[in-house]
Image (tube, rainbow, N blue to C red):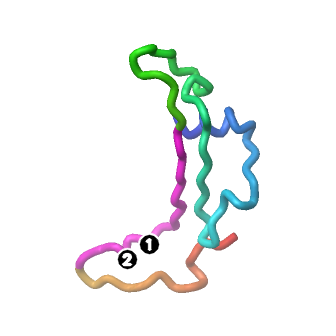
């Protein structure tokens, strides 16, 4: 839900520089009030950074403790 609001603030458009070579993407917004969150004077205004890591089924083979392996090149996400 919060990612959807963040993309709405950016008008669902991201630059090519926002994407990494592995298919992940990230972007930032300047003010949290753009998300529809109420302004609280005690907190002030702050920005947010979003970073999304995409994966396919089977990606945990790289991160598990027992019998770990590597994700094959055809199964990796790319631009």
Q: Is residue 59 magenta?
A: yes
Residue 21, located in which quarter of the rendered image? bottom right
Residue 9, located in which quarter of the rendered image? top right
Residue contact between numbered discs 1 and 2, judged by CB atoms under 8 Å: yes
Image coordinates of residue 56 in percent, x first then y, are: 52, 67
Question: Does 15 sit left or right of 48 as displayed?
Answer: right
In the rendered view, tell whether residue 60 sits above or below residue 67: above
Give SS at disc 2: helix
Query: Residue 1, can we see it?
Result: no
Looking at the image, which is closer to me, 31 or 13? 31
Q: Characterize the local packing of mark 1: few (<14), some (14-19) or many (20 or more) Cα atoms within 10 angstroms.
A: few
Residue at (68, 34) in percent of width and height: 8
Looking at the image, which is closer to me, 33 or 11? 33
Image coordinates of residue 19 in percent, x first then y, are: 66, 61
Q: Is residue 38 magenta?
A: no
Q: Which residue is mark 2?
A: 61
**What are the residue bounds of the magenta stretch?**
48-65
């Amino acid at each position: 839900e919060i990612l959807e609001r963040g993309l709405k603030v950016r008008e669902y458009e991201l630059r090519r520089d926002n994407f990494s070579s592995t298919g992940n993407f990230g972007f930032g917004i300047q003010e949290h009030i753009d998300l529809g969150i109420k302004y609280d004077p005690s907190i002030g205004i702050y920005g947010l950074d979003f970073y999304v890591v995409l994966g396919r089924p089977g990606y945990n083979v790289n991160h598990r403790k027992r019998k770990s392996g590597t994700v094959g090149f055809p199964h990796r996400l790319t631009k």
